[in-house]
Image (spheres, rainbow, N blue to C red):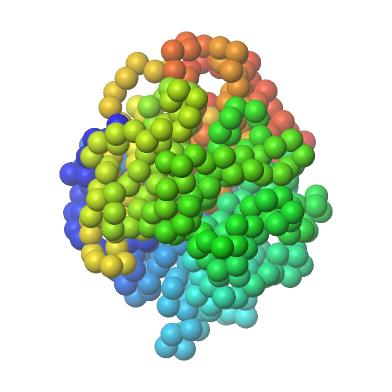
């Protein structure tokens, strides 16, 4: 399935890396790959037509920190995404701040958490994952922080432009040993929160429609409290239009929680798919453009695994060069960096030993594709928007990633493989505020940008 193209990463030396996110850092309309460094520079990798090279601003590089999780979203409604970097060395050395919240103004970047007016809100607790959420459907996002042994946090900008922790107000300030996060309209129009834990039950926070939440993980069947959860990915595994959850458990059985009408979840993972591994990140993406997601397990110190839907079941398939049996996988993300309509896979490694990054491409084929990029009213990526593509009598449902995998965030574009179909009947986009846009018969083989409908 995958070919190793890591030689296309310039200056790709061994390093300790963790989370990976995909966002437009330099504001030119193309996406860059941001890779966190654990005691070394954060990288901003830009595709120049032949390779990826690092363009990180010195402020973003921030080499003194031990960065882990990362996510991007437009907090202030200016059309440009801010970048939250979650650091693991909180509370050490008595620093005034720990995490970073990078905001770009023109060509300059600033850390909002280092400003004196935000000092009281700054997170100083060890965290693991961060994801973006528009809990009220305003087109302005906050960042949910999964801490290790402390309550969840929710950073938002107040009307006066100051950072506040709204977790208690929103009703999500439960204590947990937080790991993977996913924020999306899972149960209704507004964005819900899936918060995995290493010790104790997983949480599912249902959005009540007014920006507050109730926790219903046990009631809906995803608590799974016996195992140490790591990564989570979202997909419509059975094509029924309901979004499902792929959950990787560290050295425990992996889960494919399929959503049933009414909002309950049932684990349908077969014996091969559920086989325990030392998993970190999980990804659901259509790498071969056949119209069906593949399921990727990025493992730590053992071979990676890839599953495809074959003969009405999830079957492990040959993944080629991305097997990586000796890789200390920490983070992974997907994006179409070169614009050829096929997804690239970027792997970060580290923790146990310094290792270089990896870039993998898929084998060429003649399957068709369409990529859809919904925007907020301000023109920023509409993370959390749900997109349905109907082609050749089949409906595919995807959601724009606001945070998933483990420590990571995918590109803010939904990617549809179309297989042998050569036309799309319609594309429907639903934003977290409930607004809907329909595009009939869009051309394929391109990125379809869908602006937010006027009020």
Q: Residue furthest bottom?
A: 94
In the depicted view, which residue is nearer to us: 117 or 95?
Answer: 95
Foreground residue among 212 and 52:
212
Q: Is residue 214 left or right of residue 121?
A: right
Where residue 39 sits in the image (x, y, percent)? 32, 72
Image quadrant containing the N terminus: top left
Residue at the spot 31% in from the left edge and 67% down from the top edge: 351
- Percent position of residue 65, x then y: 38, 73
Front residue (pair 213, 400): 213
**Which quadrant of the figure contains the C terminus?**
top right
Query: Can residue 75 be seen by looking at this rendering?
Result: no
Residue shown at 35%/43% (left/top)? Answer: 305
- Up the image or down, 50 lies above or below 88; here it is above
Q: Is residue 417 above or below residue 53?
A: above
Does residue 255 appear in the picture of this structure?
Answer: yes
- Identify the image quadrant of residue 302: bottom left
Image location (x, y in percent) of residue 178 = 55, 66
Up/down of 152 relative to 8, above or below? below
Residue 43's quadrant in the figure? bottom left
Number of numbered discs overlaid on the protein picture: 0
In this view, the residue in front, 351 or 337, is 351
* In the displayed structure image, the side of residue 263 where residue 237 appears, left or right: left
- Residue at the image point whose x is 51% and y is 70% from the top: 127
- The image shows residue 326 at horizontal and vertical percentages of 23, 55
């Amino acid at each position: 399935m995958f070919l190793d193209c890591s030689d296309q990463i310039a200056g790709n030396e061994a390093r300790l890396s963790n989370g990976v996110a995909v966002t437009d850092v330099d504001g030119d309309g193309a996406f860059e790959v941001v890779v966190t460094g654990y005691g070394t520079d954060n990288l901003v990798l830009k595709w120049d037509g032949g390779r990826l090279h690092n363009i990180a601003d010195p402020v973003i590089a921030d080499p003194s920190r031990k960065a882990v999780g990362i996510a991007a979203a437009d907090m202030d409604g200016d059309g440009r995404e801010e970048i939250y970097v979650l650091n693991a060395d909180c509370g050490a050395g008595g620093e005034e701040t720990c995490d970073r919240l990078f905001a770009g103004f023109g060509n300059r970047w600033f850390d909002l958490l280092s400003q004196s007016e935000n000092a009281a809100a700054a997170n100083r607790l060890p965290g693991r994952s961060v994801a973006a959420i528009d809990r009220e459907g305003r087109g302005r996002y906050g960042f949910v922080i999964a801490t290790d042994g402390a309550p969840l946090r929710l950073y938002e900008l107040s009307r006066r432009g100051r950072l506040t922790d709204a977790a208690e107000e929103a009703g999500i300030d439960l204590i947990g040993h937080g790991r993977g996060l996913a924020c999306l309209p899972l149960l209704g129009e507004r964005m819900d929160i899936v918060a995995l834990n290493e010790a104790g039950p997983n949480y599912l926070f249902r959005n009540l429609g007014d920006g507050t939440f109730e926790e219903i993980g046990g009631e809906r069947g995803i608590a799974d409290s016996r195992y140490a959860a790591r990564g989570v990915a979202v997909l419509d595994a059975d094509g029924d239009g309901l979004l499902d959850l792929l959950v990787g458990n560290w050295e425990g059985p992996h889960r494919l929680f399929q959503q049933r009408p009414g909002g309950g979840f049932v684990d349908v993972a077969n014996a091969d798919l559920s086989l325990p591994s030392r998993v970190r990140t999980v990804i659901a993406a259509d790498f071969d453009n056949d119209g069906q997601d593949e399921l990727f397990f990025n493992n730590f110190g053992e071979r990676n695994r890839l599953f495809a839907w074959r003969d009405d079941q999830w079957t492990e398939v040959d993944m080629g060069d991305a097997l990586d049996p000796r890789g200390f996988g920490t983070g992974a993300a997907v994006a179409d960096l070169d614009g050829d309509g096929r997804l690239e896979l970027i792997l970060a490694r580290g923790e146990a030993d310094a290792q270089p990054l990896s870039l993998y491409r898929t084998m060429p084929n003649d399957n068709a594709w369409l990529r859809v990029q919904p925007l907020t009213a301000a023109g920023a990526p509409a993370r959390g928007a749900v997109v349905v593509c109907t082609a050749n009598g089949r409906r595919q449902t995807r959601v724009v990633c606001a945070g998933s995998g483990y420590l990571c965030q995918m590109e803010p574009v939904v990617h549809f493989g179309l297989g042998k179909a050569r036309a799309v009947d319609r594309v429907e986009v639903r934003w977290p505020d409930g607004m809907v846009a329909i595009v009939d018969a869009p051309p394929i083989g391109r990125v379809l940008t869908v602006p937010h409908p006027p009020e």
